[in-house]
Structure formats: C-alpha cells, structure tokens
C-alpha cells in the first residue's frame, strides 16, 4: 500500500513544512519557499480566491488555470512575462493602502467579520512582521470584548515575546470575566455560562496555526488531565477555570 | 487454459486513487474483456491540516495490438435518443364589418362600406426528450470517459466508487493475420482533474483567507508528486496527461 506521504521526496516534505509554518501569506514568497517552479507548476490549476496583493507574478505561467475571485492591488506585479493564456480571471481589485491606514481600518471595523477581513488584507500584504505583530498585540490588549480579542488571536503567531504574552494574558483574563458576567446577568443562571464558554472554545478552534488554536490546544490538555471524556464541544463541559487556566498559559 | 495464454499485469501505483483490473475470457473465436475500475480518495495530513486527494474526471483508454473490438455490446453506450416532436394546429376565423358615411359641402352623399374576413392557422411544435446521464460513457476509438453527474450538473469533486463493476467492457477479435494479441489499458487523467483540496479550512471565510495561499501551494506540491509518481510507474511522456493506473494483457 502506497500512501501520498510515501511518494513525497524529503525536499517536498521540507517544503510543505516551510510553507505551513511560514508567517507570510504572500503568495510569491510562499512559492519561493516551496521550491515550485512558477513557469511550470501553476498551469491548469484551481487557483481561485487567492490573495495576490503585493505579489510579484512576473514569469508565472497560469495557462488554463482558474484565477477567478483572486485579489490584487497596485503592488501586484503582472507584466508581459506573466502567461495568462486560457486563464479565467475575474480580479477583485483592492486598494493598496499604507500600513498605518490599514491598521486604522482594523480599528474602525464595524464588526467581527469586517475586522477579520481587514486583518486578512493587512497580513496578506505586509506579513506577520514584528511591526504588525506588535500592533496586533497592542490592539488585542485594548479590545473591548473577548470576541474582539479572539479576532486578533486568530492572526497572532503562536510564538510571542514574554512581554507580549503577559499583555495578552492579562487582557484575555479580564475580558473573559467581563464576558461571563454579562452572560450570567442576562438570565441570572449559571448554566448560561456553559453556552458562553462553549462558544468561546468553538471560536478559538477556528484558525489553525495561530495563537487562538494554541489556546484551544491548552484547553484540550487541561481537559485531558481531568480524566474525562475529552471531546471538547461534545459531552465534556468546559468550565470557567479551564479557560482561565488556558489563557494563563499564553506564551508558554 | 486462457490463463496460460494471456499474461495480465496490473500497475496501480497510486493504489488509493484508482484500481484497474482486467480479466479475459474465451468466447468461441472472440475474447470477452472484463474490467473492474474503482476510484477512491486519500487524505494527506500535515500537522493539524488535512488535504483530500482524488480525481474528478478520468479516461480509460485501450491500446490494441493484433486485435480489434467487435461490434458487440460495449459498456457505457450512450445511444443518441429519439426526439419526439409533436405538432398541433389551431385555426382561427373572424368576420367583421366596417362602414362610414357623411354629407359633404356640395350636398352629395358619400358613403362606403366594407366587409372583411380573416382566417388564420397557428401551428405549435413541442419537442420532448429524456436523457440518461451515465457516469461512464463509451467514447470513440476504444476509450471511456468516467465523469459522474450530480443532480445539479457535472460533478467537479473527486470520484469515489466503482466506475466499472467487474463486467464486460467489450469483445475483442484477433486481427486477420495477427499472431499475437496485446492490450494496454490506461486510466488517464488530465493535470486539472487531479483534485487536492484542504478538507477543512479556516471557518472565518474562504475568500482571501490567510491559509488559502498556503493550501494552494501545498496542493500543488502534492499534485506534482502524484504526476511524477504516475509518470515513473507508467512511463508516461506527456506532461498534460497522467496515467494513474495501467494494465497490460499480453498473449504469451
């Protein structure tokens, strides 16, 4: 029996690791890390919904590929050397804003969906640079609600400096307390808190490879140690202390 | 014994994706070629991310030497259907009368009257046809296309299931003057038909999501590995088409 794993060369396995652990979502940089050949490996492919903002696509051959709903902006470089023969395109044109304006857009986002969208754009264009991470830590620490904090946690890297981790721990604990007291005040019943806790855990689980996922991992470990049936969101009920402990482990 | 006359060798290098097997039986002076063709999907897992690998469309092609297919029933015949045209005729008749009269300044009387008649016929044509959409369709020159349909059209997702269920594919007859029969059957897929998709992405929205670029690049690495493996195992020279399974039947 031959599995897909068996046909991958050591170089390809390394490339997958480089790509998945990379902090940059910039398409061209990821392609460079992957060792794929832009002149050959992107023909006749489903490449829909890619964020190509800021990507240098000179020399790419997209013959026969589907590039519909891909986003590009003024910084995306496409020239005569980019082959678009029989390529389906329906670009989403995004405005290339300076980083400060993008951050302002995050601050003024009307809700969680819009915030996630702008954070996506910010990171797609500028990557998770030290500057961007510092900004996100600061914004998460000043968040008004736990949901807003989790929005940032869904983009923050898993590895953080001690100072950043401390700031986030404090903010998360405070916001959790606020969220749970608000939930209880609605019905004056403790059971309402269970639903709130489950909703928080479900959101933390949403985004792989980020701080949010790491916190969810802590939560799973805490549940494990309780020797219970550890199907989070299943039969096991998450308790307030579990989340507090998980938040306290940020940065560990 | 027929088993001693023919040597059958199946090469299913990507054994989780497809399995092609043949059997040959003697029918008076001809040979029945029985086939079983199955498709499946496989999962490649990296850290906490899963990719489903499969094919969405495939062709089974026979390369015959020293023999040819007869005009007997072939698997997957999609006969052109009779279209029924129904003609109905409606006739319409009508009689009208018009007239006008007046006195002019000269004292004369002026009058006119006319009768008209109208008769017309309307013809309506309606056509009715029902079509059976087969998942495997016999194509010209000893080939078959495997492409399941769904109620909403042609399926673009991976084929999973038995396409040809151990049944007679066609009947072969030795060519006049031919002294050695050989059949090479290949399951060929185009590069575009190899499907690699992240099983569960970020739930925050697929469009422009942070992981979309990474998923696409990892998918391309897996596709490239599959193409290489198939080309090596089946000695395929074409870069656009990959043979994922092959079976050789040769007279000893």
Image (cartoon, helix red, strand yellow):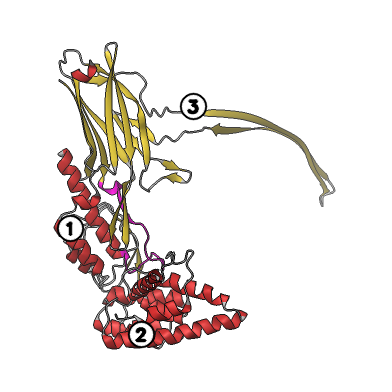
Q: Which residue is mark 3?
A: B82
Check contact, mark 3 vs mark 1: CB within 8 A.
Answer: no
**Gap in angstroms between the C-alphas marked 3 and 1:** 54 Å
Q: Residues within 10 Å of mark 2 (few under 14, many from 20)?
A: many
Q: Position of residue B115 (x, y in %)?
A: 77, 36
Q: What residue is drawn where x is 54% and y is 28%?
A: B84
Which quadrant of the figure has residue B240? Answer: top left
Do discs 3 and 1 belong to a common subunit? no
Q: Which residues are magenta?
A: B191-212
Which quadrant of the figure has residue A227? Answer: bottom left
Q: What residue is drawn where x is 37% and y is 21%?
A: B73
Q: Position of residue B63 (x, y in %)?
A: 21, 28
Query: Of helix, strand and loop, which one carries label 1?
Result: helix
Query: Of helix, strand and loop, which one carries label 3?
Result: loop
Quarter of the image containing the C terminus of chain B?
top left
Q: Is residue A81 visible?
A: no
Q: Position of residue B147 (x, y in %)?
A: 37, 40
Quarter of the image containing the N terminus of chain B?
top left
- Nearer to the camera, A132 or B88: A132
B151 on left or right of B214: right
Check contact, mark 1 vs mark 2: CB within 8 A.
Answer: no
**Gap in angstroms between the C-alphas marked 3 and 2:** 72 Å
Q: Which residue is mark 2?
A: A168
In magenta stretch: residue B6: no
**Gap in angstroms between the C-alphas marked 1 and 2:** 36 Å
Q: How many marks on residues?
A: 3
Q: Indicate whether B130 appears above or below A115.
A: above
Which dot, 3 or 1, sits closer to the camera?
Answer: 1
Chain bearing mark 3: B
Which dot, 3 or 2, sits closer to the camera?
Answer: 2
Label disc, if present, on residue A12 of the rendered structure: 1
């Amino acid at each position: 029996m031959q599995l897909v794993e068996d046909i991958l060369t050591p170089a390809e396995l390394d490339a997958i690791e480089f790509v998945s652990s990379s902090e940059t979502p910039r398409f061209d940089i990821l392609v460079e890390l992957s060792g794929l050949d832009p002149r050959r490996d992107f023909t006749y492919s489903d490449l829909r919904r890619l964020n190509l903002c800021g990507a240098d696509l000179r020399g790419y051959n997209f013959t026969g590929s589907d590039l519909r709903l891909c986003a590009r902006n003024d910084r995306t470089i496409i020239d005569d050397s980019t082959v678009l023969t029989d390529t389906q395109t329906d670009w989403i044109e995004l405005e290339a804003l300076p980083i400060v304006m993008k951050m302002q857009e995050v601050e003024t986002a009307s809700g969680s969906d819009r915030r996630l969208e702008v954070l996506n754009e910010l990171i797609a264009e500028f990557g998770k640079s030290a500057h961007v991470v510092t900004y996100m830590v600061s914004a998460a620490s000043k968040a008004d609600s736990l949901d807003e904090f989790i929005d940032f946690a869904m983009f923050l890297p898993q590895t953080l400096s001690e100072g950043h981790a401390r700031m986030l721990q404090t903010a998360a604990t405070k916001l959790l307390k606020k969220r749970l007291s608000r939930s209880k005040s609605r019905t004056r019943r403790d059971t309402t808190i269970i639903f709130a806790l489950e909703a928080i855990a479900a959101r933390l689980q949403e985004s792989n490879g980020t701080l949010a996922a790491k916190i969810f991992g802590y939560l799973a470990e805490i549940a494990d140690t309780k020797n219970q049936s550890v199907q989070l969101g299943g039969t096991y009920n998450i308790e307030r202390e579990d989340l507090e402990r998980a938040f306290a482990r940020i940065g560990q | 014994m027929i088993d001693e006359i023919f040597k059958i060798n199946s090469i299913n290098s990507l054994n989780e994706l497809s399995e092609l097997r043949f059997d040959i039986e003697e029918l008076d002076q001809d040979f029945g070629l029985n086939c079983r063709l199955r498709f499946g999907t496989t999962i490649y897992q990296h850290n906490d991310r899963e990719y489903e690998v499969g094919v969405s469309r495939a062709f089974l092609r026979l390369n015959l030497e020293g023999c040819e297919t007869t005009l007997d029933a072939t698997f997957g015949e999609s006969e052109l259907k009779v279209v029924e045209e129904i003609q109905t005729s409606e006739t319409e008749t009508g009689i009208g009368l018009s007239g006008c009269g007046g006195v002019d300044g000269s004292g004369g009387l002026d009058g006119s009257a006319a009768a008209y008649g109208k008769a017309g016929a309307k013809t309506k044509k309606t056509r009715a046809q029902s079509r059976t959409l087969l998942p495997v369709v016999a194509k010209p020159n000893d080939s078959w296309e495997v492409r399941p349909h769904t109620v909403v059209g042609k399926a673009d997702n991976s084929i999973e299931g038995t396409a040809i269920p151990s049944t007679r594919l066609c009947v072969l007859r030795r060519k006049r003057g031919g002294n050695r029969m050989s059949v090479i059957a290949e399951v060929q897929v185009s590069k575009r038909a190899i499907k690699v998709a992240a099983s569960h992405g970020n739930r925050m929205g697929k469009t422009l999501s942070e992981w979309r670029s990474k998923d696409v690049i990892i998918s391309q690495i897996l596709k490239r590995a599959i193409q290489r493996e198939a080309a090596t195992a089946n000695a395929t020279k074409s870069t656009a088409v990959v043979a994922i399974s092959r079976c050789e039947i040769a007279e000893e």
